[in-house]
Amino acid sequence: MQRSNLLFLSLMLVGLLWGSTQAKALPLSHSQDVHGQECGQLAKAVLSNISELLKDKEQFNGFNCSEMTAKVHSKTSTVSACTPTVSGQGCSGQIAQNTQFNKADCLVNIRADMEYYKRVLEAQRTQHSKLSQVVKATSNMLEKCNWSTSESAPPSETVCASGDSFSDRMCLCEVVQGFQLRAITITRALYYIASGDYQS
């Protein structure tokens, strides 16, 4: 008897877990899936490749890249455009201003950032393997998220010389550090879009 009860409880538990799994696996709408869940995973892959590049002693030989100052792309408004909707009471007790999240504006800024960093990194003459992986992951994200790039368009500003001198590599390190910070913001924003919380 006890054995049959145990079996019954086990089957019920499996059923509950299966139902929970199925509920989580329901697909998002097309726009949310393309610009959120899938693109969030692709952005996470870009971020992972950037982290590996920053540890690359071949690319950044002779100095500690992790100690360099980040040089972030300043011609976009990704951080402010992709900040989640905020409302409620702040730390001072005052009611915080409601900031309405604009998905379209956020995605425009994300695309501009990704295109910018892709062009800057592609311009480097010396393409060590880990740098090439970052470029590849960035290109893949732009392509899979239906964000077409202007291949002929030059970088909006000259950031680093494309040589392999010590100063060139230090400059590149600072740019990659900036890309890492921006990629963190982009990844979080895309998962926020995927969640659909901004629509509530």
Image (cartoon, rainbow, N blue to C red):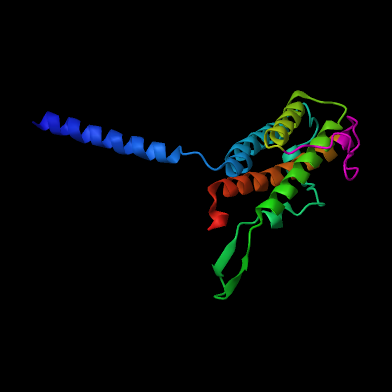
User: Extreme left residue here?
Assistant: 1
Q: Is residue 61 above or below residue 193?
A: above
Which range is magenta?
Answer: 147-168
Seen in the picture, residue 92 relative to 151 is either above or below; the reply is below
Is 74 one of the magenta-colored residues?
A: no
Q: Is residue 96 above or below residue 169?
A: below
Can residue 68 be seen in this snapshot? Answer: no
Percent x, y of residue 162: 90, 33
Q: Quadrant of residue 53?
A: top right
Asked whether the viewer can see residue 39, the reply is yes
Residue at x 18% of width, y 33% of height = 8
Q: Is residue 15 left or right of residue 161?
A: left
Q: Position of residue 142 (x, y in %)?
A: 72, 36
Quadrant housing residue 35: top right
Residue found at the very far front of the displayed protein: 30
Pinpoint residue 147: horizontal percent, then vertical percent. Answer: 73, 39
